[in-house]
Amino acid sequence: MPAPEFRRPAMLSDERAALLPGEPDPADRNDLAHTTATALVAGGRAGADDADLQRRLVQLVDVEGLDLLAQLWSASPAETLPGALWRLYLLREWTRRDPHMIAERYRLGCSRAEVSEVVAGVVSPPGPQEVRDLTDAVLHGVFGGDLDVALDRAAAFLHVLVAGTALDADWVENADAGGADRLTRRAGALQSTAEDLQQAAALWRAGKLD
């Protein structure tokens, strides 16, 4: 069976795309978020053997832009499919923008989060390219593998970064209390996102992530 043709996310109709600008009705926004996320994942999994389709899904932000995905999914709760997809694409975009810092904090965190390091599966020692490769691999898992495993892998990656960021905060606390506070708050935000992704994985396994 040939893979479905890939267009814009969930092949938006003109009517639905017109809902994006401005402030759409919350019910319309929610409906659009779930429709696009479900169609995107279903289309990708139906075309799991189509390497070109898989590549375009992983690189969706590169083509469509983060702003479009933000309008589609950023308001969706973490325990929903669009909310989970938003967090994964945002993580990929972050690794593109600051791979050197992420790689350094990941290396710092490996000594404190050894189990998560194994689950994340990053080449050791990781460099900028390795952290970029990890988020691509996670998205490949969403569309061509076990979605819950992909979500757990992203969560494990973040858990290692939490440990590294917290360690970095400890090191700079005496010299830069304000910087240490910012790092501590960043670690808390990363921990929250990791927990969101773990919850989404559990919901997927239970057949309740939609």
Image: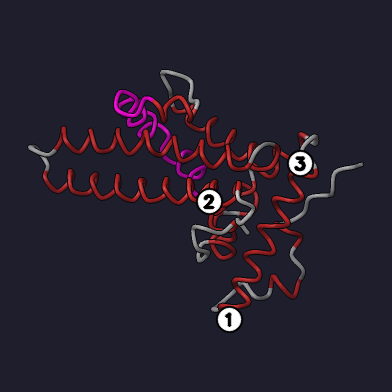
- Residue 53's label in the rendered image is 3
Estimate the x, y position of residue 2 in percent, counting from the top left. 90, 42
Residue drawn at point x = 23 percent, y = 33 percent:
167
Badge 3 marks a residue whose secondary structure is helix
Residue drawn at point x = 59 percent, y = 33 percent:
137
- Category of crowding for the residue at label 1, using alpha-carbon neighbours closer than 10 angstroms: few (below 14), some (14–19), many (at least 20): few
Nearest the eye: 29 or 115:
115
**Extreme residue toward the right, this view:** 1
Badge 2 marks a residue whose secondary structure is helix
Estimate the x, y position of residue 134 in percent, counting from the top left. 53, 31
The answer for how far apart the CA atoms under marks 3 and 2 are is 24 Å
Residue range of the region highlighted in magenta in the rendering:
89-114
Q: Is residue 93 above or below residue 66?
A: above
- Tell me the kind of residue under disc 1: Asp
Nearest the eye: 92 or 85:
85
Residue located beneath label 2 in the image: 200
Q: Quadrant of residue 105?
A: top left
Question: Which quarter of the rendering shows the N terminus?
Answer: top right
Q: Earlier along the polypeptide chain: callout 3 or callout 2?
A: 3
- Residue 5's label in the rendered image is none
Q: How is the image coloured?
A: secondary structure
Question: Which quarter of the rendering shows the C terminus?
Answer: bottom right
- Residue 25's label in the rendered image is 1
The answer for how far apart the CA atoms under marks 1 and 2 are is 25 Å
Badge 1 marks a residue whose secondary structure is loop
- Tell me the kind of residue under disc 2: Ala
The answer for how far apart the CA atoms under marks 3 and 1 are is 32 Å
Q: Are marks 1 and 2 in contact (CB under 8 Å)?
A: no
Estimate the x, y position of residue 179 in percent, counting from the top left. 18, 45
- Tell me the kind of residue under disc 3: Leu
Q: Is residue 144 above or below residue 199?
A: above
Question: Mark 1, mark 2: which one is toward the viewer?
Answer: 2
